[in-house]
Image (spheres, rainbow, N blue to C red):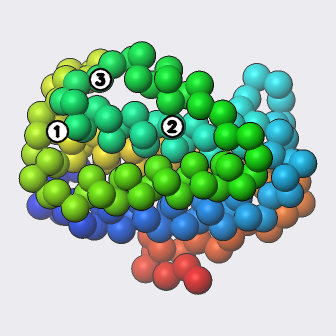
Amino acid sequence: MNEKFLSPKQLFSYLEEIHKLNLAALELVPSDRLNYRPVKELYSLGDLFKHLYANQKFYITVAKLGKMNISDYKKFMAESPETKEDLRQYLLSTFSETKELFKDEKIFSKKISTIAGIRSVFHLFIGELEHQIHHLAQIYTYVRMLGIKPPDSGYFMGIESK
């Protein structure tokens, strides 16, 4: 995507909307169902939420350092919120860090070294947006499999969520 078509402010709006949907979906899942997974090879619901925000923490760190260290990713993935409330706080605190990062629009032109080559921080967070959308769909599928109606999401069609 080209910055002419999507600004950091717009990108943050999309990430923020998905964050709200993640929180709403988490709220709907009973604590004792956070370990639900359709098959043993897949992340559980709780693991999916943690994975999304561990990845976001990783990208924040990469943006600040200017390079990827896989050891940082492993460290974030090893974090393990114990309860549903701990998980909720993990999501909130991580997104708060994201919000702080997005206050400095200059950072988005910063070039960083990634495993896929040199990328801008802006393009790194375009990847984060795709990652969030991918796993939100997975979370919604799991929630539906549990017989729970997921939150309405129409933001991308111009419909604000409640």
Please name the amino acid that badge 1 sits on: Ser
- Mark 3 surroundings within 10 Å by alpha-carbon count, few (fewer than 14), some (14 through 19), many (20 or more): some
- Rounded to the nearest angstrom, the CA distance separating label 3 from label 2 is 14 Å
Q: Residue 40 in the image: x percent, y percent?
A: 82, 25
Q: Is residue 55 above or below residue 71?
A: below
Residue shown at the point (53%, 58%) measured from the top left:
92
Give the mark, 1 or 3, whose residue is nearer the N terminus: 3
Q: Where does label 1 land, which residue? A: 120
Q: Of the residues under marks 2 and 1, which one precedes in the sequence? A: 2
Kindly identify which residue carries mark 2.
Answer: 54
Q: Secondary structure at mark 2?
A: helix
Q: Amino acid at mark 2?
A: Ala
Kind of element beneath mark 1? strand
Q: Which residue is mark 3?
A: 68
Q: Nearer the viewer, residue 158 or 98?
A: 98
C-alpha span from label 1 to label 3: 12 Å
